[in-house]
Image (cartoon, grey):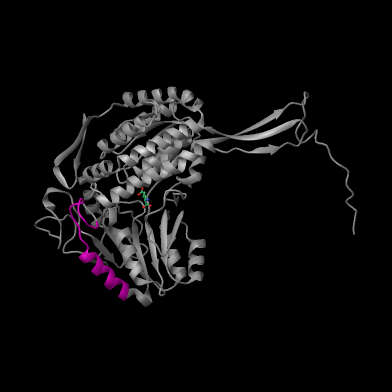
Amino acid sequence: MQIQSVNPADLSDVVATIEAPTVADVVDAARRAHAAQRAWADVPAPVRGRVIAAVGRLVESNKASLAALITREVGKTYAEALGEVQEVIDTCDFFLGEGRRLYGQTVPSEMPDKQLFTYRAPVGTAFIITAGNFPTAVPSWYLVPALLCGNTVLWKPAEVSPAISAALTSIFHAGGIPTDVLITVVADGATTAAALEISLDEGLIQKVGFTGSTAVGRQIGALTGRHLQSPCLELGGKNPMVVMPDADVDLVIEGALFSGFGTSGQRCTSLGTLWVHDDVYEAVKARYIRSVETAIIGDPRGDVLYGPMISAAYLRTHERNLELVADHHRVHGSTGVGQITADNPRAGFVGDPDVGVFAHPTIVEGVRAGDALYDTETFGPLVGLGRFSSLDEAIELSNGHGYGLSSSIYTTSPDSVWRFRSRIGSGMVSVNNSTSGAEAHLPFGGNGRSGNGSRQSGMWVLDQFTRWQAVNWDWSGRLQKAQMDVVELPSDPSFRL
Ligand code: UN1
């Protein structure tokens, strides 16, 4: 069997064709990565840090070609693709110095001639499964810290981006990562699931990282739980943007346009529902509709808000989600809904829509709790629009579906900011900024249906790829029993001034 990727802006352009691995091939790769781990962990951490530095510089010098490949293989606009590659560089820049830190602590002991320490020990071999919407940046959030910490990695990228994942892997290898320390296998879901289960059973994998749907995240959570492992899960979102009456409406429109429809709405941080206070509802609605209606869509190499869907399968999912539009909803934003074609045209489209898989932007007005669209992650150019009359109601609507990845509030009131921040359930909160566009050195992750509380990025991800080892070293020459052989100095509890 073969796996083939095509340019979603021009389906006649085949980008890569690879031989699909069997379950045995993937397990064999896990075995090789596992066998390579001890030697990699023995490489001094500062040396591993220098390898990450070399990888970062290589990504930087290949930035334009990597970004062009992202645009070609998954249809991301070139400007966004450059941003995505920059996120890989930022991640390398952040972690190259960690090789010289990876701090542990020295801790005093209760007893003389004894000392306590903590060390960060690598976890082992990580099985990393990532999605097609961020084919380099999100993988780098796992790969870079995992490798820096002394783990080996088996990376299973999305089937839609085999050329990009091969390019990124070759950059890691060119930077000095040994071949078996990072092994990349592009496999389908069923093969991956079967190989993961066998690899866990054989004790080849000590950490699973997964970015993708909540449904698959639950399966991985159950599987790894049986092996007493806690995976790093980065799952779906239904990210709310709350607009208070004192919001700067220009900012709101800009933020809601980009986070709702940038990347064709295919970010886990994309805007799910725009919740607008009654007092400004009509004004915000009118301006939002106008901005979406006039946004330029089309060839992702050009100056457009968004290009095609990642692949035909993503377009089909979007079309299925459009069936969730109910009678009490009203649809706005374009000259049609669903796929953009010559027969279902989009005003101002750049290029030929018929050769790719492009979708109209859709605003669904009238979303309320209880609607399927209220709590379904749509992962496409579809944004819900709803209203509220108090901040308490907005917070309830924002939390009520159980997702908790990203959220945003637009207001000039410190009181509203504080109440929202302290009561919203999401792992990431933006104030007067959109739901997407997290910086690469803050903890990234969600709660509830969005994840199991694990965090990627910045120093927080070190807890995913290392385990604390507590060491006590006694040179007294006798067994000093903790809690029992501790010297007690005399004190006078009855003393008063
Ligand atoms: C994702 O969609 O899985 O915060 C990640 C953002 C990007 C990463 C998105 N930096 O929008």
In the rendered image, the vertical position of residue 177 relative to residue 249, given as above or below? above
Q: Is residue 223 magenta?
A: no
**Res 141 → quadrant:** top left
| Viewer-closest of 63 and 12 | 63
Q: Is residue 391 visible?
A: yes
Q: Position of residue 175 (x, y in %)?
A: 37, 32
Q: Is residue 295 magenta?
A: yes
* Placement of the C terminus among the 4 image quadrants: bottom right
Q: Position of residue 463 (x, y in %)?
A: 52, 40
* Placement of the N terminus among the 4 image quadrants: top left
Which residue is depicted at the point 35% across and 67% down?
A: 252
**Res 164 → quadrant:** top left
What is the residue that sits farthest to the bottom in this orientation?
A: 279
In the rendered image, the vertical position of residue 312 relative to residue 152, given as above or below? below
| Viewer-closest of 446 and 396 | 446
Q: Position of residue 56 (x, y in %)?
A: 38, 39
Q: Is residue 218 visible?
A: no
Which range of residues does the magenta coloring cover? 282-305
Which residue is depicted at the point 32% across and 50% down?
A: 83
Q: How many marks?
A: 0
Q: Position of residue 289 (x, y in %)?
A: 25, 68
